[in-house]
Image (cartoon, helix red, strand yellow):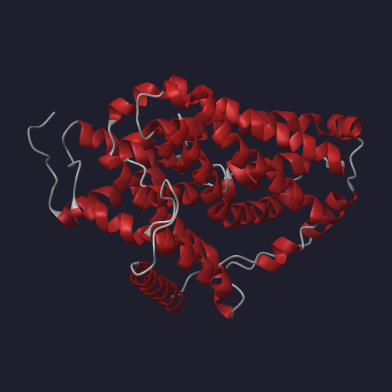
Amino acid sequence: MFADPLVTEPMALAALLTAVLGVVFWLDSFEALDPVFKYLPPVIWAYFVPMLFTTIGITPAESGVYDWMSTYLLPFSLFLLMITVDLKAILRLGPMALFMMCAGTLGIVVGGPVVFALFGSFFEDPVAWKGFAALSGSWIGGTANMMAMKQSVGTPDSTLGPLLVVDVVAGYGWMGVLIFLSAYQDRFDDWMDADTAAMDRLNEKMKNAEDTRRPVTLRDLAVMVGIALGATVAADAVAGGLPELGDPTIITAGTWAILLVVTAGLILSFTPLQEMENAGASRVGYFALYLLLTSIGAKADLAAVLDVPLYLLAGVVWIAIHIAFLLAAARMVKAPLFFVATGSMANVGGAASAPIVAGVYLPAMAPVGLLMGVAGYILGIYAALGCSWLIGLVAVGL
C-alpha cells in the first residue's frame, strides 16, 4: 500500500487502464487459460484488476480521466452497437423466438422489484436499489445496458462491485445449467409437445448463411469513430436542456443522452452505415465499453465485495423468477428448449453469451443467438428503465 497513488497524470492513467484491458484480452487468447476465463470472463477482470490497483495505491480513486470516460465512452459505444443492428433480420426470426425473448425480459422486469421487496431491508447500503437497477440492465441485454442503467440512476461504484459478482456467478452459473440441459433438449421438447417447425426452418436457413466480414480500412475507422463521436457530443448537448423525470429520478441528463444516441443509432441502422458492422464497428463499440469498465473498477471499493452472499441469494431468486416466466411462456406456445435457452441468454447474457448457448444446441444457429442477443440489448435499454423505476419505488416504500 502506497501513501500516494503512483499513477495520477491523466495520460499515464488512461494508458495504464488501456494496457490492463489489452493484457486481459491477450491472456484470454491462450488455450491454457481457457478454464480460467470460462468462469471468470474478461469483463470481470477488466473491472477487478483496476479495483485492486486502487486498493494497493497504484491508481487514484478519483480522477478527471474517469469522469471523461463515464461521460463519453458509454454513449459512443452504444451508438456503434446500435448502428450495426440488422433489425430486419431480427424481425425475421419469427414470432416464437421473439415471444420467448420478451417472456424472459418480462421475468427480469417483474423479478427485480419482487426480489428487492424480499431482500432490500437486509442491505446495509442505503442505495443498494441502484445496484439492482444496474443489474437489471445487465440481465436485459448485457454489459452495455448495465453501464447505461448505472449512469441513468447514478449507481455508486462501491455499490456496483457486489452486483458484478452476482452478474458473473448467477448469470454464468445459469448459462452453465442451460449448456448442460442441451443434452436433454429432445426429452424436453417431447415433454412440452413442442412445435419445432420454426426452429428447423431457421436451422436450415442458417446453415447456408454467408460471412460478410472484411478487414477494417482506414476509411471505415474514420467514418465509424467520427460519426460516433459526433453523435455522442450532440446528444450530450441536447440532453443538457431536457428535464429530469421520475420519483425517484430515473431519467436524468445522462439517461437522455443515452436514449438519444440509441434511438439515433437504430434509425441510422436502416441506412448504408449499417454495413460498418462488416468492418467490425460493434467491436470498436465493445472496446470503448470495456475501457469504461476499467475506469469504474478503479473508482470502486474492494471491501464492498464482502457483502456478496446476500446479494448472490437475491440474484439466484431473481433468476428463478425469470426461469418461471420462460417455462410458462414455453408451455403456452409449445416452444422447444432451444428457444427457451436462447431467449434466456439473449437477456441474461446478451449478445456475448446467446450465440454460445445457441451454438451448443444447434451449431448452425449461433447467428440466431447473436440476433436474439442484439434484440435483447435494444429492448433492454427501454425495459430496464421501467424495471429500475419499479425497484426504486419499492426502495422508497421500505
Rendered position, 183 above or below 254:
above
Which quadrant holds the C terminus? top left
Rendered position, 374 above or below 186:
below
How many marks on residues?
0
- Which one is nearer the viewer's eye here, 220 or 332? 332
Residue drawn at x 32%, y 54% as measured from the top left: 70
Which quadrant holds the N terminus? top left
- The reply to whether residue 214 is in sight is no
Relative placement, left or right, of 310 versus 203 is left
Relative placement, left or right, of 340 versus 167 is right
Percent of width and height locating residue 287: 41, 56
- Which one is nearer the viewer's eye here, 279 or 231? 231
Percent of width and height locating residue 114: 58, 31
Residue drawn at x 72%, y 31% as measured from the top left: 324
- Which one is nearer the viewer's eye here, 94 or 133? 133
Which quadrant of the figure has residue 162?
top left
Rendered position, 333 above or below 233:
above
Relative placement, left or right, of 373 versus 144 is right
Relative placement, left or right, of 353 versus 50 is right
Percent of width and height locating residue 395: 45, 34
